[in-house]
Structure formats: structure tokens, C-alpha cells
Amino acid sequence: MKIVVIGGSGLIGTKLVNNLRQHGHEVVAASLSSGVNILTGEGLAEALTGAQVVVDVANSPSFEDKAVLEFFETAGRNLLTAEAAAGVGHHVALSVVGTDRLLASGYFRAKMAQENLIKASPIPYTIVRATQFFEFVGAIAQSATDGQTVRLPPALMQPIVSDDVAAALADVAVEEPLNGTVELAGPEPIRMDELVRRFLSANRDARKVTTDVHARYFGTAVNDQSLTPGDNPRIGKTRFEDWLSRSIPQK
């Protein structure tokens, strides 16, 4: 099966490409570095020739409200148009758990726009919404840091490691299109303040986490339902503690 991975040189894309190739598929890792530009459409037709499945894991280089909306709308239209011309039979897109609940955020509004374009297209699709990646915890801490204090809400999360996301996407890519959404989450719920506290401690980072119910997640108010999956998500196997122990250099 020929599968094109859009954003094939990124964190998830690289792992997904390797996973699919190990299973014997013909995989095109499409990105700017391979001459495919989803904003201008350059190289798209060539990359999609003969493809049965496209998996879109590309992300916006800017999270500014206007820029991120333009990225996902423009890229989405270009990609779906090129897929229709190429006869692609399954469009798989990576999105985020809670997208529809966090529309006060420009990023999530942009992801919602991307999802709506996919649903309006005639191409059979599966949208895969994942919870936050373990690899993203450092950025959460940084966004909430003021001096030596990291102020975070105690909102519940259920983060997942990128390896498990890539493995699930590889499975979805070769399954029949759902024309619907599947959710991915890690094996254990944890509160955001405690997640970052454990991350900083493991890294011997001197910053201290202060729990504040009014603190925001990248400028957006969250509660226990905002970042957690609904019923019957696909569950990754890797626990946060296991990832921490193998990903942080021993000092």
C-alpha cells in the first residue's frame, strides 16, 4: 500500500514513516525538505500519485491566532483538493483531544476548522484526536513560568507518548475509514500541576510548581473535562514514569 505522510519529518511523522515501512508499505515522507509545500501546493500532485492513504500530521510553524488558522485552512484545502484529484481513498488527520471544548484558544479554533474541512470533503476519513504528548510537558512548564515559579491549574490530563501515537496512527492508516473520530490517550490520568512537578523533579529543575485553580493552559481556562478523552479511547501502553526514566539523562 502506498501511504503519504504529510509532515513526515516531524516528531510524529518520522516515527510513523519508520513504523509503516517496517510493516512493508511504500511510504512517502512529504515535507518542505522533500519538496512538498502544502501551503503553496508545490510537489503535492507528484507525491500523491498512486497513493491509497494520506496521513496528515503537519503542524503550524506559528501558533499566533491568525497565522495558525491560515495554515490549517490553506493546507487543508490544498491537501484535500490534491487527494481528490489523485483518487486517495482514506484521509487520516492527527488532531487534539478537547478541540471542540477549547475554542477560546486560537490554536484549537484552527484545528476545528481543519476538522470541518475534512468532514465536508468527499474523501473517506478518520480523525485521530490525541491527548498531549509527554514530550510537550517541558513547553507546558515554560509557558507557565514566572521567575522560579510555575503556576498551573490542577486540571486533569491523560497524556501519551509520541511513540504510542505513531503506532496508533499506523494502525488507523491501514484500517477502513471511520468517517468519524477516534481518541487516543495515555494509560493514566494525572493532574497538570503534578505532571509538571514530576517532570521538573526528574530533571532536577529548581523551579517550583504552584497550584492555582485560576491559572490557564496557554492562556485558556481548562477543567477536568477539557484535556481528557471521552468513553472508550484507544489507550497507549507507556506510563509517564517509564518515559521519564528512559528519556532523562542520568546525572
Image (cartoon, helix red, strand yellow):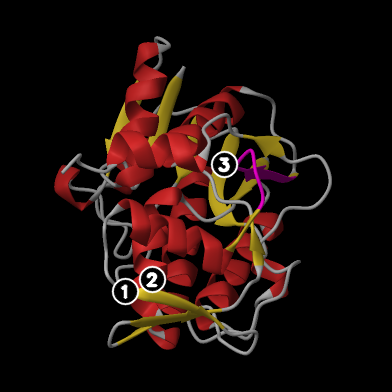
Mark 3 vs mark 1: in front? 1
- Amino acid type for the residue under numbered disc 2: Ala
Residue identifier under label 3:
91
Local packing at callout 3 (Cα closer than 10 Å; few below 14, some 14-19, many 20+) is many
What percent of the width, then of the height, locates residue 184?
64, 43
Local packing at callout 2 (Cα closer than 10 Å; few below 14, some 14-19, many 20+) is many
State the residue in front, 58 or 214: 214
Give the mark, 3 or 1, whose residue is nearer the N terminus.
Answer: 3
The magenta-colored residue range is 181-189
What percent of the width, then of the height, locates residue 196?
45, 63
* Residues tagged 2 and 1 counted as in contact (Cβ below 8 A): yes
Give the mark, 2 or 1, whose residue is nearer the N terminus.
Answer: 2
* Residues tagged 3 and 2 counted as in contact (Cβ below 8 A): no
* Residues tagged 3 and 1 counted as in contact (Cβ below 8 A): no
Q: Which quadrant of the view contains residue 168?
A: top right
Distance of label 2 from label 1 (alpha carbons): 9 Å
What percent of the width, then of the height, locates residue 11?
32, 45
